């Protein structure tokens, strides 16, 4: 049994100037592999919609989708902190529903925390969720659930006004009690400034190296997702190509009669075979 990484451990890592590593997972085997690799936190992100379910954006992901995948990941993870994303419209229909949905992610999904996108406009929901005993991770900058409002996947916070608004939002989220804050697709200088002004850790994605931790979508990092990846992604492997090659080889071997071979076959006694062929009666 491994000692579980907690939200307090995230805060401690910032204090100790130890960088925090996070990745996304959406299923049991990936959760298990990431956990065994020693990652600090696993986000079951609503990026699920794009990289696993084949949607064009995250707005079609439902609470049922999230709970189903969070459950699967949680079953495979013993050590890392599991954070479940609250999907589009699951925290915009009143505080009671926000708390109930966050509660499902903990109670049914078995995650240890939830993540919500947005700043001052969702503070009441965040406060109520935290009051119910559920740790909350914030998410500012590029917030994909608002893609129709933002108009595209652009870098956020490039003007003084936008940057100041992000700084205010970050401080408001910290005051509301979030234990960590994802900063997505903002200039590195702004992420540095926000990280230096907060006592909670910032987790960057496309936000430079000054954040207290980093997160990437695992399907991008491993080269599984064949759609367009953002330019801030670094591909550490080309698993998609490896899968395609392996599957092509399998198809060829089936067609040519090389698969299954002797090692993949079972046999019975020769006498029984003879009887079956009609020689034994
Ligand atoms: O849904 C997700 O995977 C995310 C990360 C990109 C931070 O929100």
Image (cartoon, helix red, strand yellow):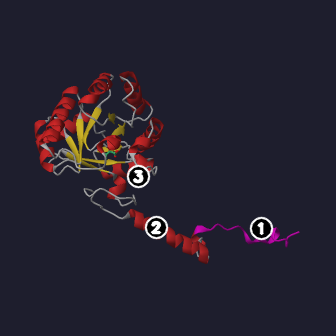
**Local secondary structure at mark 2:** helix
**Local secondary structure at mark 3:** helix
Q: Is residue 1 visible?
A: no
Give the foreground label among 1 and 3: 3
Dot 3: within a 10 Å radius of its alpha carbon, few (fewer than 14), some, or many (20 or more) residues? Answer: many
Q: Quadrant of residue 107?
A: top left
User: Which mark sits nearer the N-terminus, 2 or 1?
Assistant: 2
Instruction: Say which residue label 2 marks.
Output: 244
User: Which mark sits nearer the N-terminus, 2 or 3?
Assistant: 3
Distance of label 2 from label 1 (alpha carbons): 41 Å
**Does residue 275 belong to the magenta stretch?**
yes
Q: Quadrant of residue 279?
A: bottom right
User: Which mark sits nearer the N-terminus, 1 or 3?
Assistant: 3
Check if mark 2's residue and mark 3's residue have beta carbons within 8 Å. no
**Local secondary structure at mark 1:** helix
Q: Position of residue 9 (x, y in %)?
A: 23, 37
Instruction: Say which residue label 3 marks.
Output: 51
The foreground one among 226 and 27 is: 226
Q: Is residue 179 positioned above or below 247 on the image? A: above
Give left or right: position of 278 versus 34: right
Q: How many numbered marks, from 0 up?
A: 3
Q: Is residue 191 visible?
A: yes
Q: Ligand 1 lies in which image quarter?
A: top left
Q: Position of residue 222 (x, y in %)?
A: 35, 59
Q: Position of residue 100 (x, y in %)?
A: 41, 25
Q: From the image, which quarter does the N terminus lie in?
A: top left
Distance of label 2 from label 3 (alpha carbons): 17 Å
């Amino acid at each position: 049994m491994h000692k579980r990484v907690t939200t307090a451990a995230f805060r401690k890592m910032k204090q100790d100037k130890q960088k925090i590593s996070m990745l996304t997972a959406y299923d049991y085997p990936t959760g298990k592999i990431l956990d065994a690799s020693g990652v600090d936190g696993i986000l079951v992100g609503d990026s699920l919609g794009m990289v696993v379910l084949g949607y064009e954006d995250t707005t079609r992901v439902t609470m049922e989708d999230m709970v189903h995948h969070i459950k699967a990941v949680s079953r495979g993870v013993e050590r890392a902190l599991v954070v479940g994303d609250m999907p589009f419209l699951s925290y915009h229909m009143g505080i009671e529903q926000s708390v109930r949905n966050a509660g499902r992610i903990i109670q049914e999904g078995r995650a240890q925390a939830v993540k919500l996108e947005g700043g001052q406009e969702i503070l009441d929901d965040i406060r109520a969720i935290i009051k119910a005993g559920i740790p909350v991770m914030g998410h500012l900058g590029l917030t994909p659930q608002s893609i129709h409002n933002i108009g595209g996947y652009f870098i956020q916070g490039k003007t003084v006004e936008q940057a100041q608004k992000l700084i205010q939002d970050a401080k408001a989220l910290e005051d509301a009690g979030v234990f960590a804050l994802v900063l997505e697709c903002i200039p590195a200088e702004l992420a540095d400034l926000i990280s230096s002004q907060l006592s909670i850790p910032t987790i960057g994605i496309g936000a430079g190296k000054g954040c207290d931790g980093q997160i990437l979508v695992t399907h991008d990092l491993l080269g599984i997702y064949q759609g367009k990846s953002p330019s801030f992604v670094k591909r550490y492997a080309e698993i998609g190509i490896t899968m395609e090659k392996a599957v092509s080889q399998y198809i060829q071997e089936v067609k040519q009669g090389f698969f299954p071979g002797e090692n993949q076959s079972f046999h019975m006694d020769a006498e029984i075979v003879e009887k079956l062929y009609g020689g034994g009666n």
